[in-house]
Image (cartoon, rainbow, N blue to C red):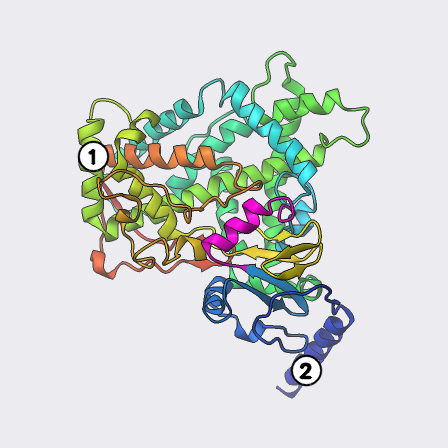
Amino acid sequence: METSVLLLLAVLLSFLLFLVKGHAKVHGHLPPGPRPLPLLGNLLQMDRGGFRKSFIQLQEKHGDVFTVYFGPRPVVMLCGTQTIREALVDHAEAFSGRRIIAVLQPIMQEYGMSFVNEERWKILRRLFVATMRDFGIGKQSVEDQIKEEAKYLVEELKNHQGVSLDPTFLFQCITGNIICSIVFGERFDYRDRQFLRLLDLLYRTFSLISSFSSQMFEVYSDFLKYFPGVHREIYKNLKEILDYIDHSVENHRATLDPNAPRDFIDTFLLHMEKEKLNHYTEFHHWNLMISVLFLFLAGTESTSNTLCYGFLLMLKYPHVAEKVQKEIDQVIGSHRVPTLDDRSKMPYTEAVIHEIQRFSDVSPMGLPCRITKDTLFRGYLLPKNTEVYFILSSALHDPQYFEQPDTFNPEHFLDANGALKKCEAFMPFSIGKRMCLGEGIARSELFLFFTTILQNYSVSSPEDPKTIDMTPKESGLAKVAPVYKICFVAR
C-alpha cells in the first residue's frame, strides 16, 4: 500500500514537472473565462459527463466568447448562433485553419482532407466533389445507390420481424455501404466477415474518440502519450483499417483502367500517375490512404449514429412516427419507393428529420480550428495559431431560435401554415468554408433510409416510451447514441 502511494506521488511529480517544462506563453488579448489553476488549467471544472456540458454551463456565466485552459494551453470557445456565424462566415479565412485531435495525430498526422491546411483541403475536396459529379457511385447516381441499399435493408428486416434487435449494426451496414461504393467501388453483404470486422473497428473507434478518456488525452497528450491508454487502442484499430485500405489500393492499382475509373481510389491513382514527377504534389500515397480512412470513418458513423438517435426518438414519441407514416401514405403510398423529389411535398417528415439532427446533436463541438492570422474578434485579439472550438450544440439549443430547445418538437421547423421553415441556428454540419464535405450525401441518406423504413415497417419498443433514456453512451467530440432494442413490424 505504502509503495503504491509513493509510486503515485512519483508519477504525479513527474507529471507536474513535465507540464512546467511545456508551459506555453500566451500573447495577444484572449477573452476572459474561468480562473485556471497553475498547470491544471480548468481541468477541475470539467464535467465527467463530457466537456460539452461544462462549456454550455460556462457560456451561461461568461457569455458566448471565453477562454478555457486545457492544462497550460489556452483554448477559445465560441458559443451561440450569431457568434459562430460571425466567425465562420464573416471571418471565414481567419477561422479556416485546423488542429488535429490528439488521439488521431499518430495515424492521420497532417495528411488527408480534414485536419490539414486549407490548400491541401481545397485540392483533395475538389477531387472528391469531381468524383461524385463525374461518376456518381458505381456508375449510379447517389440517389439510386441509396434507394438500392434501402431495398436491401427492407429485405433484411423481414428476417427480424417481431424480434427486438439493436439497430446499430444494420444502420452501420447501410451507411457503410454507401461510402464503400464511393471509395472502393463496391458494396458488401451484411454477413461479409471482413465488412463486419471493419464496421466493428469503426464503431469502437468512434466511441473511444468521444470518450472522457480521449478528452483527458486532448488536455495532457504530451504526457499521456508515453503510457498505455485510449490513444493506443485507437491507433491499433485504425492501423488495421489502414491495412485493409492499403490492400484495396494495391488491387485497384493492379486492375486500373485509365479510361474507365471506377471510384475515388481510381481517380486518385490517376492523379498520382499524372503528377508523379511533381515533388510538391498532394497526390501521393499517404494523402490517399488517410483521405479514404477519414471518409470511411466520418461517412459511416455520423449518419448511422443519427439514424440510431432518430429511431430511438420514434420509439419515445410514437405519435410523431405515426404522423410521418401518414404523410408517407399520402404522398408516396405503398407501391413505389421514396425519392428525393418527395422531400418538397413532405414538410412534416423533413421537419422531423431536422429536429432529430438538432435534438440528437451528434457533433456538439465540431472539429477544433486554428486561427490562420492575428484576428480582432469581438474586441479580443486572437493571435495566429490560437486554438478555437465552435460549440455547435449552443446553436442547436439556442433559446432565441427554438422555443423549447431541450424538448423534441418537430414544430421547431414548421411555420404557421405547416410549411418547412429555415433556421440559421440549424448547423448540424457546421457552416462556412470548412463545413462537412458529406452534407449532401448525409441529408439524402437520412431522408431515403428514414422514409423507406417507415413506409414498410412500424416500430415498437420492449419498454414503455416514457422510460426510454436518451442519455448518450459517450459524449465528447461526438455524442454516441445509447444502446437500445427495437422491433420492426411489417405494415
Q: Is there a contact, CB below 8 Å, between mark 2 and mark 1?
A: no
- Are there few (<14), some (14-19), or many (20+) residues within 10 Å of tag 1? some
Q: Horizontally, is 334 left or right of 46 in the view? A: left
Would you say 375 lies left or right of 457 here? Answer: right
Is the N terminus in the top left, top right, bottom left or bottom right quadrant? bottom right
- In the rendered image, residue 448, in percent from the top left (x then y), is placed at 34, 32
Residue 416: % across, % down: 22, 44
Question: Mark 1 — residue?
Answer: 327
**Image height check: is 14 above or below 91?**
below
Q: Position of residue 253 (x, y in %)?
A: 67, 22
Q: Amino acid at mark 1?
A: Glu
- Provide residue 14's location: percent of width, then percent of height: 73, 76
Residue 63 can be seen in this image: yes
Residue farthest to the front?
379
**Total label count?**
2
Nearer to us: label 2 or label 1:
1
Pick out the residue farthest to the bottom. 2
Residues 415 and 228: in front is 415
Identify the residue at image location x=22%, y=56%: 465
The residue shown at (61%, 66%) is 31
Q: Earlier in the sequence, mark 2 or mark 1?
A: 2
Residue sitting nearer the eye, 317 or 242:
317
Q: Is residue 188 above or below residue 14?
A: above
Residue 218 lies in magenta, yes or no? Answer: no
- Residue 167 visible in rendering: no
The quarter holding residue 18 reads: bottom right
Residue highlighted by disc 2? 9
Along the viewing direction, whichever of 212 and 431 lies nearer the viewer: 431
Q: What range is drawn magenta here?
A: 78-96
Element carrying mark 2: helix
